[in-house]
Image: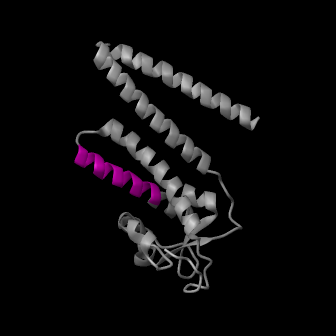
């Protein structure tokens, strides 16, 4: 995707970097939510995959219907509009968010819009008058804590099996370690912000 603002000169399209930042933030947050839902509803891998896609669809669709922006777009001061610069219709947003999952190939396109933008006739524009809400730090924190928790459970499961520790002890160890991590993160956040 190469944004030149020559093809759609009436709209100030978001840059490739802004679109990439939107993707990174929204992918992290929506995937985290989806993985939590999968954790509590897991039955098999096929259903888990469908749940993952469904939760991510609901995340994007609901934010864009209500605000015309996802948390990533709040961070970059961008929003979704139709060709007249107004809020897209429900049908356009439904089309946009269904086709979002095939839009991975937009990065190699010379078109100024992603595939899901073109199919739904929507645009992501930059608007510096919008209120910025910082989500990048939250998204990175979620990603890092999630990876830490995942690795922690792998290590605890390994040692539980290796040393034949019962599951109640494993859960107790996990809770203690997670509490220490959460207190550490909270302490660092308070120290940096106050």
Above-or-below relation of 85 to 166: below
Taking 148 as reference, is 35 above or below it?
Answer: below
**Which stretch did the figure color magenta?**
45-60
The spot of residue 49 in percent (x, y) is: 29, 50
Q: 94 or 72: nearer the eye?
A: 72
Q: Is residue 124 visible?
A: yes
Residue 59 in the image: above or below residue 176: below
* Label tally: 0
Q: Is residue 41 left or right of residue 144?
A: left
- In the displayed image of the protein, which residue is found farthest to the right? 194
Overall secondary structure of the magenta section: helix
How far across and how far down the image is residue 155, in percent? 38, 25
Q: Residue at x 50, y 59 (%)?
A: 23
Q: Nearer the viewer, residue 85 or 116?
A: 116
**According to the image, what is the colour scheme of the structure?**
one colour
Q: Quadrant of the C terminus?
A: top right
**Residue 61 x, y percent position in the rendering:** 45, 61
Quadrant housing residue 78: bottom right
Taking the image as shown, residue 125 lies to the left or right of residue 58, namely right
Q: Residue at x 64, y 63 (%)?
A: 77
Q: Quadrant of residue 128?
A: bottom right
Can residue 91 be seen? Answer: no
Q: Position of residue 22 (x, y in %)?
A: 54, 60
> To which quarter of the image does residue 4 belong?
bottom right
User: Magenta segment: does it hold 52?
Assistant: yes
Residue 136 on the magenta segment: no
């Amino acid at each position: 995707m190469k944004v030149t603002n020559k093809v759609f000169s009436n709209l100030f399209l978001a840059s490739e970097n802004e679109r990439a930042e939107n993707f990174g933030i929204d992918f992290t947050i929506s995937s985290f939510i989806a993985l939590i839902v999968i954790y509590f509803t897991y039955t098999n891998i096929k259903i888990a995959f469908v749940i993952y896609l469904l939760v991510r669809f609901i995340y994007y669709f609901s934010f864009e219907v209500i605000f015309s922006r996802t948390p990533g777009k709040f961070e970059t001061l961008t929003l979704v509009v139709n060709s007249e610069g107004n809020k897209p219709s429900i049908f356009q947003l439904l089309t946009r968010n269904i086709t979002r999952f095939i839009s991975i190939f937009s990065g190699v396109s010379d078109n100024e819009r992603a595939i899901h933008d073109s199919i739904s006739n929507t645009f992501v524009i930059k608007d510096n008058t919008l209120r910025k809400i910082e989500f990048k730090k939250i998204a990175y924190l979620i990603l890092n804590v999630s990876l830490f928790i995942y690795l922690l459970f792998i290590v605890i499961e390994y040692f539980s099996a290796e040393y034949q520790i019962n599951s109640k002890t494993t859960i107790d160890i996990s809770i203690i370690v997670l509490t220490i991590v959460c207190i550490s993160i909270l302490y660092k956040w308070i120290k940096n912000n106050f």
